[in-house]
Image: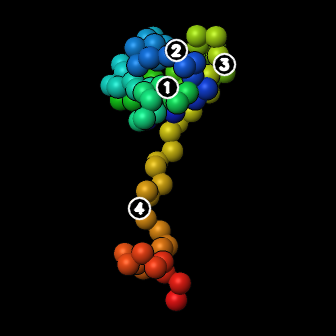
């Protein structure tokens, strides 16, 4: 089960969130999401746990708890929405724009 962990301290690391969840069972992966330009934490991450019962226990136990001085938000991750391009119109490479 993929678990969303929000409101993380900017000091949180992959190891920090892995340790918090390992007390509830096996953790397949733990990742703090970082800004691709400056490398700073974006304040959220994801933890993957293979056993749904252990994951549910971790969610119930850790949601609202304090981690590194911040009250974290923990719940089951929603599937990503399709990140494909939408709408648009025709691209005009002539430099005149796409007025008509």
User: Residue 61: percent from the left, percent from the top?
Assistant: 59, 18
User: Residue 82 sits in which quadrant?
Assistant: bottom left
Residue at (48% x, 54% y) in the render: 81
User: Residue 62 sits in which quadrant?
Assistant: top right
* Residue indicated by mark 4: 84
Which comes sooner in the sequence, label 3 or label 2? Answer: 2
Is the residue marked by circle 4 packed among few (<14), some (14-19), or many (20+) residues within 10 Å?
Answer: few
The secondary element bearing badge 4 is classed as loop
Left or right: residue 66 versus residue 4 is: right
Residue 53 visible somewhere in the drawing:
no
Left or right: residue 29 versus residue 85 is: left
Asked whether the residues under the numbered discs 2 and 4 touch, taking CB atoms below 8 Å apart as contact, a structural biologist would say no
Distance Cα–Cα, label 4 vs label 3: 34 Å
* Residue indicated by mark 2: 11
Question: Which of label 1 and label 4 is nearer to you?
Answer: 1
Residue 50 visible somewhere in the drawing:
yes
């Amino acid at each position: 089960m993929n678990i969303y962990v929000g409101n993380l301290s900017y000091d949180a690391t992959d190891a920090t969130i892995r340790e918090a969840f390992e007390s509830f069972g096996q953790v397949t992966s733990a990742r703090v999401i970082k800004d691709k330009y400056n490398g700073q934490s974006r304040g959220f991450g994801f933890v993957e746990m293979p056993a749904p019962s252990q994951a549910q226990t971790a969610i119930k136990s850790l949601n609202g708890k304090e981690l590194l001085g911040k009250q974290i938000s923990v719940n089951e991750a929603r599937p990503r929405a399709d990140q494909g391009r939408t709408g648009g119109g025709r691209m005009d490479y002539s430099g005149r724009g796409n007025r008509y």
